[in-house]
Amino acid sequence: MLGLMLQRFPIASRIFLSALVTICVLGLAEWGLGDDEWSALYDGDPGTMWWLKGDLDLPDVPHLEEGTSFSVKTNALGLRDGMMPVASPWVLALGCSTTFGWGVEADEAWPAVLEQELGVPVVNGGIPGHSTEQGLVMVHRLFSHKPDVVILGWGLRDAQRTTVADVDRRPAAFPRNTALYKTLRRKLQSPVVTKGTIPRVSKPRFEANLRELTTLAQESGAQVLLLDMTERSDSPSHGEVLAQIGPPVVVPKLPNSMVFSEDPIHLNVRGNEALALMLAPGVSALLASEAGALLDP
Protein backbone atom coordinates (compact mmCIF):
# COMPACT_ATOMS: atom_id res chain seq x y z
CA MET A 1 0.00 0.00 0.00
CA LEU A 2 2.78 2.42 0.95
CA GLY A 3 4.62 1.52 -2.25
CA LEU A 4 1.57 2.32 -4.40
CA MET A 5 1.12 5.65 -2.67
CA LEU A 6 4.79 6.56 -3.19
CA GLN A 7 4.58 5.81 -6.94
CA ARG A 8 2.36 8.88 -7.33
CA PHE A 9 5.31 11.13 -6.38
CA PRO A 10 8.52 12.00 -8.31
CA ILE A 11 11.59 9.86 -7.60
CA ALA A 12 13.26 12.50 -5.40
CA SER A 13 10.10 12.87 -3.35
CA ARG A 14 9.74 9.11 -3.02
CA ILE A 15 13.32 8.84 -1.76
CA PHE A 16 12.69 11.64 0.75
CA LEU A 17 9.43 10.11 1.99
CA SER A 18 10.99 6.63 2.29
CA ALA A 19 13.85 8.07 4.31
CA LEU A 20 11.42 9.99 6.49
CA VAL A 21 9.35 6.85 7.16
CA THR A 22 12.53 4.89 7.99
CA ILE A 23 13.73 7.59 10.38
CA CYS A 24 10.34 7.68 12.10
CA VAL A 25 10.28 3.89 12.50
CA LEU A 26 13.83 3.82 13.89
CA GLY A 27 13.03 6.78 16.12
CA LEU A 28 10.02 5.02 17.58
CA ALA A 29 12.10 1.88 18.15
CA GLU A 30 14.81 3.92 19.88
CA TRP A 31 12.23 5.65 22.07
CA GLY A 32 10.63 2.34 23.00
CA LEU A 33 13.97 0.77 23.91
CA GLY A 34 15.36 3.82 25.68
CA ASP A 35 14.57 2.66 29.21
CA ASP A 36 16.43 -0.66 28.93
CA GLU A 37 17.96 -2.71 31.72
CA TRP A 38 21.23 -0.76 31.71
CA SER A 39 19.75 2.73 31.77
CA ALA A 40 17.32 1.86 34.55
CA LEU A 41 20.30 2.13 36.91
CA TYR A 42 22.88 4.24 35.14
CA ASP A 43 23.52 7.42 33.20
CA GLY A 44 26.56 8.04 31.04
CA ASP A 45 28.39 5.81 28.59
CA PRO A 46 28.52 2.08 29.47
CA GLY A 47 32.02 1.63 28.06
CA THR A 48 33.86 4.61 29.49
CA MET A 49 32.14 6.67 32.19
CA TRP A 50 28.87 5.89 33.94
CA TRP A 51 27.25 6.68 37.27
CA LEU A 52 24.12 5.75 39.19
CA LYS A 53 21.09 7.88 38.48
CA GLY A 54 20.06 10.26 41.24
CA ASP A 55 16.92 9.73 43.34
CA LEU A 56 16.37 6.14 42.21
CA ASP A 57 13.78 3.93 43.89
CA LEU A 58 13.97 0.52 42.22
CA PRO A 59 12.38 -2.31 44.23
CA ASP A 60 13.58 -5.25 42.13
CA VAL A 61 17.05 -5.03 40.59
CA PRO A 62 17.92 -8.51 39.30
CA HIS A 63 20.87 -10.42 40.70
CA LEU A 64 21.07 -12.61 37.63
CA GLU A 65 23.62 -15.15 38.83
CA GLU A 66 21.63 -15.94 41.95
CA GLY A 67 18.17 -15.65 40.41
CA THR A 68 17.14 -13.14 43.09
CA SER A 69 16.63 -9.39 43.29
CA PHE A 70 17.40 -6.49 45.63
CA SER A 71 16.26 -2.90 45.96
CA VAL A 72 18.28 0.20 45.07
CA LYS A 73 17.61 3.72 46.27
CA THR A 74 19.96 6.62 45.64
CA ASN A 75 20.26 10.17 46.87
CA ALA A 76 20.43 13.26 44.66
CA LEU A 77 24.14 12.61 43.99
CA GLY A 78 23.45 9.09 42.78
CA LEU A 79 24.87 7.37 45.86
CA ARG A 80 23.28 4.37 47.56
CA ASP A 81 22.68 6.33 50.74
CA GLY A 82 20.63 9.11 52.29
CA MET A 83 21.44 12.79 52.66
CA MET A 84 25.12 13.77 52.72
CA PRO A 85 26.39 14.55 56.24
CA VAL A 86 26.71 18.23 57.11
CA ALA A 87 28.84 17.84 60.24
CA SER A 88 31.94 15.91 61.26
CA PRO A 89 32.90 13.23 61.84
CA TRP A 90 31.89 11.05 58.92
CA VAL A 91 33.40 8.46 56.62
CA LEU A 92 33.25 8.12 52.82
CA ALA A 93 33.50 4.57 51.43
CA LEU A 94 34.51 4.42 47.76
CA GLY A 95 34.91 1.58 45.27
CA CYS A 96 32.97 -0.62 42.89
CA SER A 97 30.09 -3.06 43.39
CA THR A 98 31.87 -4.65 46.35
CA THR A 99 31.42 -1.34 48.19
CA PHE A 100 27.98 -0.69 46.71
CA GLY A 101 26.80 -4.09 47.99
CA TRP A 102 25.67 -5.84 44.83
CA GLY A 103 23.06 -8.46 45.63
CA VAL A 104 22.24 -7.28 49.16
CA GLU A 105 20.03 -4.54 50.57
CA ALA A 106 21.54 -1.16 51.39
CA ASP A 107 21.44 -1.71 55.15
CA GLU A 108 23.24 -5.06 54.66
CA ALA A 109 26.15 -3.62 52.65
CA TRP A 110 29.36 -3.20 54.61
CA PRO A 111 29.31 0.65 54.69
CA ALA A 112 25.95 0.56 56.50
CA VAL A 113 27.15 -2.17 58.89
CA LEU A 114 30.34 -0.18 59.56
CA GLU A 115 28.19 2.86 60.33
CA GLN A 116 26.37 0.86 62.98
CA GLU A 117 29.67 -0.31 64.45
CA LEU A 118 31.26 3.15 64.57
CA GLY A 119 28.24 5.25 65.46
CA VAL A 120 29.16 7.86 62.83
CA PRO A 121 27.83 8.24 59.27
CA VAL A 122 29.51 6.09 56.63
CA VAL A 123 28.42 7.17 53.15
CA ASN A 124 28.27 4.42 50.52
CA GLY A 125 30.02 5.85 47.46
CA GLY A 126 30.42 2.53 45.62
CA ILE A 127 29.45 2.45 41.93
CA PRO A 128 29.21 -0.96 40.24
CA GLY A 129 31.81 -1.62 37.59
CA HIS A 130 34.09 1.29 38.44
CA SER A 131 37.86 1.11 38.36
CA THR A 132 40.22 3.81 39.60
CA GLU A 133 39.95 5.42 36.14
CA GLN A 134 36.27 6.25 36.67
CA GLY A 135 36.92 6.91 40.35
CA LEU A 136 39.33 9.74 39.58
CA VAL A 137 36.59 11.48 37.62
CA MET A 138 33.95 11.09 40.33
CA VAL A 139 35.79 11.87 43.57
CA HIS A 140 36.17 15.64 43.28
CA ARG A 141 32.51 16.40 43.96
CA LEU A 142 32.50 13.93 46.86
CA PHE A 143 35.71 15.17 48.48
CA SER A 144 34.27 18.68 48.37
CA HIS A 145 31.87 17.56 51.13
CA LYS A 146 34.92 17.21 53.45
CA PRO A 147 34.81 13.65 54.81
CA ASP A 148 37.01 12.94 57.82
CA VAL A 149 38.07 9.47 56.64
CA VAL A 150 38.04 8.06 53.12
CA ILE A 151 38.16 4.32 52.40
CA LEU A 152 39.54 3.59 48.93
CA GLY A 153 38.16 0.20 47.92
CA TRP A 154 38.89 -0.02 44.19
CA GLY A 155 40.89 -2.85 42.68
CA LEU A 156 38.58 -5.69 41.70
CA ARG A 157 37.62 -4.08 38.38
CA ASP A 158 41.06 -2.56 37.81
CA ALA A 159 42.45 -6.09 37.74
CA GLN A 160 39.65 -7.46 35.55
CA ARG A 161 40.92 -8.86 32.23
CA THR A 162 39.66 -7.19 29.08
CA THR A 163 40.56 -6.55 25.44
CA VAL A 164 40.87 -2.76 25.71
CA ALA A 165 42.29 -0.95 28.75
CA ASP A 166 40.07 1.65 30.40
CA VAL A 167 42.48 4.46 29.54
CA ASP A 168 42.18 3.61 25.82
CA ARG A 169 38.38 3.37 25.68
CA ARG A 170 36.31 6.06 24.00
CA PRO A 171 32.57 6.78 24.20
CA ALA A 172 30.51 4.88 21.64
CA ALA A 173 29.71 6.90 18.51
CA PHE A 174 26.55 6.75 16.44
CA PRO A 175 25.01 4.23 15.80
CA ARG A 176 26.72 2.16 18.53
CA ASN A 177 25.43 4.55 21.20
CA THR A 178 21.76 3.92 20.39
CA ALA A 179 19.48 1.65 22.37
CA LEU A 180 18.43 -0.08 19.14
CA TYR A 181 22.03 -1.00 18.30
CA LYS A 182 22.70 -2.25 21.84
CA THR A 183 19.53 -4.36 21.82
CA LEU A 184 20.33 -5.93 18.44
CA ARG A 185 23.90 -6.60 19.55
CA ARG A 186 22.69 -8.40 22.68
CA LYS A 187 20.31 -10.47 20.58
CA LEU A 188 22.79 -11.39 17.83
CA GLN A 189 26.16 -11.62 19.55
CA SER A 190 27.72 -14.99 20.31
CA PRO A 191 27.06 -16.37 23.81
CA VAL A 192 30.81 -17.04 24.11
CA VAL A 193 32.43 -14.04 25.81
CA THR A 194 36.08 -13.24 25.12
CA LYS A 195 37.51 -12.04 28.41
CA GLY A 196 40.75 -10.62 27.08
CA THR A 197 44.33 -10.83 28.28
CA ILE A 198 45.12 -7.38 29.71
CA PRO A 199 43.82 -5.77 32.91
CA ARG A 200 41.40 -2.88 32.64
CA VAL A 201 44.01 -0.84 34.52
CA SER A 202 47.65 -1.90 34.41
CA LYS A 203 49.41 -2.43 37.71
CA PRO A 204 51.66 0.67 37.32
CA ARG A 205 48.68 2.82 36.37
CA PHE A 206 46.64 1.35 39.24
CA GLU A 207 49.39 2.41 41.65
CA ALA A 208 49.59 5.89 40.11
CA ASN A 209 45.82 6.30 40.28
CA LEU A 210 45.72 5.25 43.93
CA ARG A 211 48.50 7.70 44.76
CA GLU A 212 46.57 10.51 43.09
CA LEU A 213 43.33 9.50 44.82
CA THR A 214 45.13 9.42 48.16
CA THR A 215 46.61 12.86 47.58
CA LEU A 216 43.24 14.31 46.57
CA ALA A 217 41.60 12.87 49.70
CA GLN A 218 44.35 14.17 51.97
CA GLU A 219 44.24 17.61 50.36
CA SER A 220 40.53 17.73 51.19
CA GLY A 221 41.46 17.14 54.85
CA ALA A 222 40.65 13.42 55.07
CA GLN A 223 42.58 10.50 56.51
CA VAL A 224 42.84 7.55 54.10
CA LEU A 225 42.44 3.79 54.54
CA LEU A 226 43.13 1.43 51.64
CA LEU A 227 40.95 -1.66 51.18
CA ASP A 228 42.41 -4.47 49.08
CA MET A 229 39.55 -6.14 47.18
CA THR A 230 41.76 -7.84 44.57
CA GLU A 231 41.84 -11.34 46.11
CA ARG A 232 38.98 -12.61 43.92
CA SER A 233 39.94 -10.59 40.85
CA ASP A 234 41.41 -11.83 37.58
CA SER A 235 44.81 -10.43 38.59
CA PRO A 236 45.23 -10.69 42.39
CA SER A 237 48.81 -9.41 42.16
CA HIS A 238 47.39 -5.90 41.68
CA GLY A 239 46.96 -5.87 45.46
CA GLU A 240 50.72 -5.85 45.93
CA VAL A 241 50.94 -2.16 45.10
CA LEU A 242 48.68 -1.01 47.96
CA ALA A 243 51.39 -1.40 50.58
CA GLN A 244 53.58 1.03 48.61
CA ILE A 245 51.06 3.92 48.67
CA GLY A 246 51.47 4.96 52.32
CA PRO A 247 48.12 4.79 54.15
CA PRO A 248 47.19 1.71 56.21
CA VAL A 249 45.83 -1.24 54.23
CA VAL A 250 43.14 -3.75 55.16
CA VAL A 251 43.44 -7.08 53.30
CA PRO A 252 40.32 -9.14 53.98
CA LYS A 253 40.69 -12.91 53.72
CA LEU A 254 37.16 -14.20 53.50
CA PRO A 255 36.11 -17.83 52.99
CA ASN A 256 33.89 -18.95 50.12
CA SER A 257 30.93 -19.14 52.49
CA MET A 258 30.95 -15.32 52.65
CA VAL A 259 30.39 -14.76 48.92
CA PHE A 260 27.44 -15.77 46.78
CA SER A 261 27.54 -19.36 45.53
CA GLU A 262 26.88 -18.41 41.90
CA ASP A 263 28.51 -14.98 42.08
CA PRO A 264 31.84 -15.57 43.81
CA ILE A 265 33.19 -12.01 43.62
CA HIS A 266 30.38 -10.34 45.58
CA LEU A 267 29.95 -10.58 49.32
CA ASN A 268 26.76 -12.02 50.75
CA VAL A 269 25.20 -10.68 53.95
CA ARG A 270 27.65 -12.55 56.18
CA GLY A 271 30.60 -11.38 54.08
CA ASN A 272 29.55 -7.75 54.32
CA GLU A 273 29.21 -8.06 58.10
CA ALA A 274 32.64 -9.66 58.39
CA LEU A 275 34.32 -7.00 56.25
CA ALA A 276 32.75 -4.19 58.29
CA LEU A 277 34.14 -5.73 61.48
CA MET A 278 37.60 -5.98 59.90
CA LEU A 279 37.51 -2.32 58.89
CA ALA A 280 36.15 -0.94 62.15
CA PRO A 281 39.41 -0.85 64.20
CA GLY A 282 41.41 0.90 61.48
CA VAL A 283 38.71 3.46 60.75
CA SER A 284 38.22 4.11 64.48
CA ALA A 285 41.94 4.78 64.87
CA LEU A 286 41.89 7.26 61.97
CA LEU A 287 38.83 9.03 63.38
CA ALA A 288 40.54 9.27 66.76
CA SER A 289 43.72 10.70 65.24
CA GLU A 290 41.66 13.18 63.25
CA ALA A 291 39.84 14.27 66.41
CA GLY A 292 43.16 14.57 68.25
CA ALA A 293 44.58 16.75 65.49
CA LEU A 294 41.60 19.08 65.72
CA LEU A 295 42.07 19.42 69.48
CA ASP A 296 45.80 20.22 69.30
CA PRO A 297 46.45 23.95 69.71
Image (cartoon, rainbow, N blue to C red):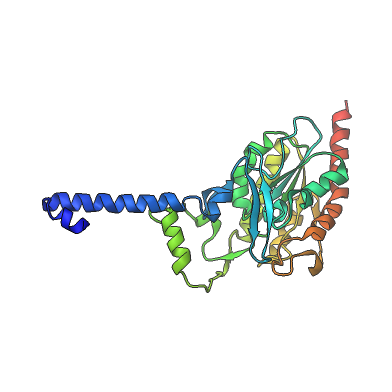
x, y percent for residue 294: 85, 30
Residue drawn at the location 86% of the way across and 34% of the way down: 291
Compared across the picture, whether 214 is left or right of 4 comes to right
Residue at the far bottom in the pictured view: 192
Front residue (pair 38, 57): 57
Quadrant for residue 237, please give it.
bottom right
Vertical side of 260 occupied by 31: above or below: above
Is residue 239 in view from this perspective? yes
Front residue (pair 54, 226): 54
Residue at the far front in the pictured view: 1
Vertical side of 220 occupied by 244: above or below: below
x, y percent for residue 281: 88, 49
x, y percent for residue 131: 62, 54
Tell me the quarter of the image containing the N terminus: bottom left
Vertical side of 211 occupied by 66: above or below: below
Front residue (pair 175, 140): 175
Is residue 251 in view from this perspective? no
Quadrant for residue 81, please give it.
top right
x, y percent for residue 64: 63, 64
Counting every numbered tag in the picture gives 0
Quadrant for residue 137, please give it.
top right
Front residue (pair 256, 179): 179
Compared across the picture, whether 116 is left or right of 239 comes to right
Tell me the quarter of the image containing the C terminus: top right
Residue at the far top in the pictured view: 297
